């Protein structure tokens, strides 16, 4: 029977396949596409194989109310896609920033958390949203704005002024290297993306009345009476089994044993390195001869240039046209009586130097690209070159002056300096060779540190068990701690890579024991639970006494009289300003959080401090701040701060509104 059913099913499917061809099939697919469009089924059809991290889609400027139906969105909406490479690049940049900010506290495992990846992805989505919004509103940035922005970047400045050499060198040292045109395109895109939030933020303002209200609050002073109830002594009463069990069950996180590891490790530092042979006379003289230039003043050349830019993607005709133009300008500049500066101002494509007549200031060796530098340092003073080709285009150079290149300091004057440098270099080489020998042996036999230790002439040491944050000496170093609790080292039991803990000081470790975090059984922590119960009893008793004082003040009794009955010393402090630690910053925060008392009354409260003591207080008077006492500089500073806060809130609101009008798809599987 089963075979018959399968056979009939096959025949039915075969017949359906034969009929599903031509216009009939197309019609059926189109009909099926309609409900898919309305109910979002295209996500199943198209996103399962998505190769991007996120996609942002926005209605076109000519149809802002375009419906969010798939066929309409596919055909009419504008879209920006955030590729996997874009995300990885942004995530790596964020990694580097975090590593710099946190220093030794940086934890690579924690940084890899999905929450961090989501934050980076959302930041890229926000940028895409702003770019689409700018495109749909026809926002464009001109060349002058791009040039002004680049000239303001500190990395391209020398003594506060834009420097073409620094600019070109910085672009060449990028990974990958960038041409000026590529960098300008990136700056243009960034400016277009930022125009909406910048202008929205700049539109914010703070009124004089807002500043006055803030000055009233900031300048407010309060008359306070307070007393300190000392931290309670632990209760000594009996604790029953039911109470012990209830406390243990209610506070499981308080009674957990932390994860611990036991490690073997070897330390390698340059104290194990000996450099027996001091550099000889011949070696010193060879070093002097090879480095003679560093002991002489560098020759510098005062130069100007005219740049005829050739785009990186220029076709052959465009490149020939640029070369022809460059040769014509070179002939004009080489003519007798020619004004090179005027020609540069009129014809140069280098906006950074054109306004100053092509002036590049003093050029040192290594500051320019090789073709440019070679031509410049082969010229005679006053000479104008033929066109020189670089990645930036064609340059016509003018050498205006030469300075430097003095005679080098004599060998005897730098002999000791060279000897120290050569000895230091020899020690560093020996240390590197020692580390290399140890690491090579560790790679050959990764399940034991003994062979590696023998190769380095050091002993294997043991530490632990210890938890995160514990240990002494090199064991306490953050990098060693991170490695010791790395999942791969714990599971494999292999020797780690060398961990640098200081200059010429490295450590290799191997995890030989591991105990996961665990709940400690009640029998093990029974005495701790009893102590916690008794401490809680005492704390609640003192807190109840403090509550009673606050309640009696609320009913109209005088604070000082009540505190005297309790044997507490009362301090009266008039005109307490914000931020004054009397007796503690948390207490002052509580004073100003209390209700304003009625005339002749008091507003009481309490705050528990970290040491377990409790400050009970009564606010008996409030004096508002006087805006007229504020200096003009203080008012202006507050106005700027309020304006900035209002601007940030406005930008956030605009970004939320823009996101709501767009369709945003994030593929978390690609993060």
Image (cartoon, rainbow, N blue to C red):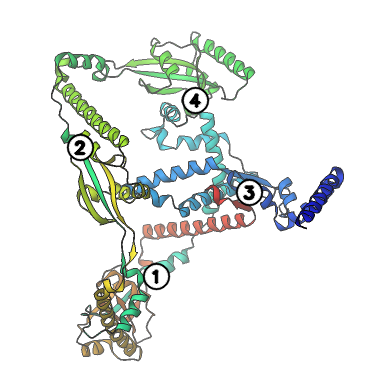
Lateral position of residue 315 relative to residue 410, left or right: right
Q: Please state if 166 lies on the left or on the right of 45 as rendered.
A: left
Q: Residue at x 38, y 67 (%)?
A: 628
Residue 616 picture quarter:
bottom left
Q: How many residues crowd around disc 2 within 10 Å: few (fewer than 14), some, or many (20 or more)?
A: some
Q: Secondary structure at mark 2?
A: strand
Q: Which residue is mark 3?
A: 48
Secondary structure under the numbered disc 4 in the rendered image? helix
In what element is the residue under mark 1? helix
Dot 3 or dot 2: first in sequence order is 3
Disc 3 and disc 4: Cα gap in Å?
53 Å
* Nearer to me, 456 or 597: 456
Q: Secondary structure at mark 3?
A: loop
Give the mark nearer the N terminus: 2 vs 1.
1
Q: Which mark is residue 354?
A: 4
The answer to whether mark 3 and mark 4 are in CB contact below 8 A is no
CA–CA distance between discs 4 and 1?
54 Å
Toward the viewer: 331 or 34? 34
């Amino acid at each position: 029977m089963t075979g018959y059913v399968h056979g009939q099913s096959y025949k039915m499917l075969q017949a359906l396949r034969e009929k599903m061809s031509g216009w009939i099939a197309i019609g059926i697919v189109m009909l099926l596409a309609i409900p898919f469009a309305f109910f979002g089924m295209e996500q199943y059809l198209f996103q399962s194989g998505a190769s991007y991290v996120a996609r942002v889609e926005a209605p076109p400027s000519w149809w802002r109310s375009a419906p969010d139906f798939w066929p309409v969105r596919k055909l009419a909406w504008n879209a920006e896609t955030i590729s996997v490479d874009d995300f990885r690049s942004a995530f790596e940049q964020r990694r580097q920033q975090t590593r710099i900010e946190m220093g030794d506290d940086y934890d690579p495992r924690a940084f890899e958390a999905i929450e961090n990846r989501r934050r980076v992805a959302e930041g890229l989505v926000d940028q895409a949203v702003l770019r689409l919004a700018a495109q749909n509103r026809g926002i464009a940035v001109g060349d002058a704005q791009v040039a002004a922005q680049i000239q303001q970047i500190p990395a391209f400045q020398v003594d506060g002024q834009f420097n073409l050499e620094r600019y070109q060198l910085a672009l060449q040292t990028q990974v990958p290297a960038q041409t000026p045109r590529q960098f300008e395109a990136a700056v243009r895109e960034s400016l277009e993306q930022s125009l909406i939030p910048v202008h929205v933020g700049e539109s914010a303002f703070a009124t004089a009345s807002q500043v006055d209200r803030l000055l009233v609050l900031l300048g407010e002073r309060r008359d306070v009476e307070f007393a300190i109830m000392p931290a309670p002594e632990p209760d000594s009463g009996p604790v029953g089994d039911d109470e012990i069990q209830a406390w243990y069950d209610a506070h499981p996180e308080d009674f957990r044993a932390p994860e611990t590891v036991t490690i073997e490790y070897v330390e390698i530092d340059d104290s194990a390195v000996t450099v027996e042979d001091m550099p000889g006379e011949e070696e010193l003289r060879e070093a002097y001869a090879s480095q003679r230039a560093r002991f002489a003043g560098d020759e510098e050349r005062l130069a100007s240039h005219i740049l005829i830019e050739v785009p990186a993607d220029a076709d052959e005709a465009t490149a020939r046209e640029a070369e022809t133009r460059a040769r014509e300008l070179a002939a004009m500049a080489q003519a007798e009586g020619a004004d090179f500066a005027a020609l540069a101002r009129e014809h140069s494509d280098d906006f950074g130097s054109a306004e100053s007549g092509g002036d590049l200031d003093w050029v040192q060796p290594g500051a320019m690209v090789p073709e440019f530098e070679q031509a410049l340092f082969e010229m005679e003073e006053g000479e104008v070159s033929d066109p020189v080709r670089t990645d930036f285009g064609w340059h016509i150079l003018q050498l205006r002056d030469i300075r430097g290149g003095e005679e080098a300091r004599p060998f005897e004057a730098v002999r000791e300096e060279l000897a120290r440098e050569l000895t230091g270099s020899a020690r560093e080489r020996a240390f590197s060779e020692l580390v290399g020998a140890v690491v090579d042996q560790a790679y050959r036999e990764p399940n034991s540190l003994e062979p590696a230790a023998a190769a380095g002439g050091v002993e294997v040491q043991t530490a632990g068990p210890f938890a995160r944050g514990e240990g002494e000496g090199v064991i306490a170093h953050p990098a060693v701690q991170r490695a010791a609790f790395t999942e791969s080292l714990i599971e494999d039991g292999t020797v780690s890579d060398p961990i640098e803990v200081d200059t010429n000081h490295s450590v290799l470790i191997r995890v030989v024991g591991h105990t996961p975090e665990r709940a400690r059984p009640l029998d093990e922590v029974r005495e701790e639970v009893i102590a916690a119960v008794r401490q809680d009893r005492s704390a609640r008793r003192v807190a109840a006494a403090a509550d009673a004082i606050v309640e009696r003040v609320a009913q109209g009794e005088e604070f000082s009289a009540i505190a005297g009955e309790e044997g507490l010393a009362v301090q009266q402090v008039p005109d307490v300003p914000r931020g004054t630690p009397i007796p503690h910053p948390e207490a002052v925060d509580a004073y100003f959080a209390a209700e304003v008392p009625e005339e002749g009354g008091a507003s009481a409260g309490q705050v528990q401090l970290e040491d377990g003591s409790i400050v009970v207080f009564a606010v008996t008077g409030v004096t508002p701040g006087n805006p007229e006492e504020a200096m003009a500089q203080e008012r202006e500073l507050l106005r700027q701060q309020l304006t900035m806060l209002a601007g940030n809130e406005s930008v956030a609101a605009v970004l939320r509104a823009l996101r709501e009008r767009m369709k945003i798809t994030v593929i978390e599987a690609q993060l």
